[in-house]
Amino acid sequence: MLQDLSLKFDKILKKVTGQGKLTEKNISDTIREIRRILLDADVNFKVTKEFIESVSIKAMGQEVLASLSPGQLLTKIFFDELVTLLGTENVSLKLNATGVTVIMVVGLQGSGKTTFCGKLANKLKGQGRKPLLVAADIYRPAAIEQLVALGDAISVPVFRLEEKDARKIARESVQEAIAKGHNTVIIDTAGRLHVDEALMKEIVDIKEIVQPQEILFVVDSMTGQDAVNSAKAFHDQVDFDGIVLTKMDGDAKGGCALSIRSVVGKPIKYISNGEKVDALEVFFPDRLASRILGKGDVVSLVEKVQSEFDESEAEELEEKLRKNKFDFEDFLKQIKMIKKMGSLSSIMAMIPGIPAQLKNANIDDNALVRIEAIIRSMTKEERMKPKILNGSRRSRIARGSGTSIQDVNRLVKQFGDMQTMMSRMTKRGGFR
Ligand SMILES: Nc1nc2c(ncn2[C@@H]2O[C@H](COP(=O)(O)OP(=O)(O)OP(=O)(O)O)[C@@H](O)[C@H]2O)c(=O)[nH]1
Ligand SMILES: [Mg+2]
């Protein structure tokens, strides 16, 4: 899905990753390349311009120039901006809990409307709804048979009439749904080559007649900016509620997917990625953004942090904390765990929900290295019983770790303070 785009993004982000720091120069170079990639992918010119501006402002911002890994940082900024571009969050279908919900499916010829109707019926059926498919495309000779075949395959009935009157078919389908106990009506309408007045009027009339909860505009993601323009034209006339991107399994350049939300102002609700009936996904902006950013995506980094975090070890540590048995040995384990995940600052950058001040604070990874060296210079006994750390032991540790006695004293004191705090919390029942 959008592989070409993904590869290009990956390549330039790798380039920055190899560099030590984010500078105005590498930010502006990267941004220039991103701009070119977006335009090559046929992303709307205005959308590209706004995207680039927004990324620049964030990347050039003061806080951003702190000692974070440039690749990760830019990846994060791109990721956030892509998510914003794609609509921030999922907007689900409005489905009535009681009564009949009518969904109307519209779009250009060959965009994948009929296929989508079948897929949606199948999905909703799987969620326990009772769909009725409606064959309202009376123009293309085989259109009705196509929908009937799809309906048969998923055991969903298809409403059809011999008469070639789409308005009548739509009206009667809702009556049929009420009579037969269907709670979801999915109307497959006729395709049009371009925005055609007579057919557009038919859609508007059907909309008036059936008062749908949802009108979904189906668009072939391979058709780039043409698709975006047609979406706009449709929207001006029928004011649809959501967008379905089809053929995302093909080699779409990404221009349509990335521009449509912003140009039309309506959410993408589903993506279709294959001809099979189950090739339909609910659309989540962050998931598509992760796929586009490929390996470097922030979401997978966050997942990495979570998976490397050893749960049984964490539980054991918590138990020790509760019993106030947490010693330097455990502390060392914690440090190892953190190191496995990368630097402290990069972990902070990855974790969602951490306040911006904290994320951008200049975290001293060297402090961790120093602490580790000090603990490593302790004997096992000293690690487990810090109380025995007298003056001569402390100076030996300082020498061994290449630090000063003050450093050792500070760490031992901080550790002692922490233990006191823990034991107070435990007594108060704070650890539950
Ligand atoms: N690869 C791929 N093919 C798709 C997808 N969705 C639809 N198609 C194919 O695209 C072609 C057109 O799909 P239809 O569902 O008939 O499109 P339509 O909008 O109903 O077409 P008209 O009724 O003629 O306007 C068919 O060959 C489908 O199998 C998809 O997500 N991926
Ligand atoms: Mg069709």
Image (cartoon, helix red, strand yellow):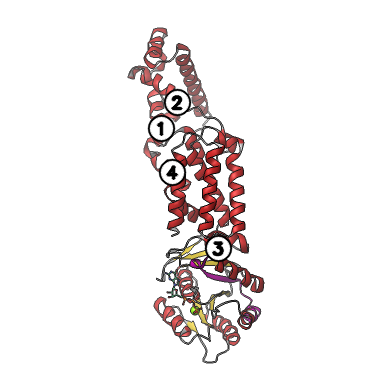
**Disc 3 from disc 1: Cα separation:** 39 Å
> Which residue sits furthest bottom?
163
- How busy is the neighbourhood of tag 3: few (under 14 within 10 Å), some, or many (20 plus)? many
- How busy is the neighbourhood of tag 2: few (under 14 within 10 Å), some, or many (20 plus)? some
Q: Secondary structure at mark 2?
A: helix
- How busy is the neighbourhood of tag 4: few (under 14 within 10 Å), some, or many (20 plus)? some
Pointers 1 and 2 in contact (C-beta within 8 Å): yes
Report if residue 71 is visible in the image.
Answer: yes
Look at mark 1 in the image and give the residue it sits on: 339
The disc, 3 or 1, on the residue closer to the chain's N-terminal end is 3
The amino acid marked with disc number 4 is Lys
Report if residue 432 is visible in the image.
Answer: no
Give residue 162's position: percent from left, percent from top.
51, 92
Q: Is residue 237 left or right of residue 110?
A: right
| 337 or 422, nearer to the observer | 337
- How busy is the neighbourhood of tag 1: few (under 14 within 10 Å), some, or many (20 plus)? some
Q: Which mark is residue 14?
A: 4
The disc, 4 or 3, on the residue closer to the chain's N-terminal end is 4
The amino acid marked with disc number 3 is Ile
Give residue 176's position: percent from left, percent from top.
55, 84
90 versus 73 height, above or below: below
Look at mark 3 in the image and give the residue it sits on: 268
Give residue 150's position: percent from left, percent from top.
43, 78
**Disc 4 from disc 3: Cα separation:** 30 Å
The disc, 4 or 1, on the residue closer to the chain's N-terminal end is 4
Look at mark 2 in the image and give the residue it sits on: 368
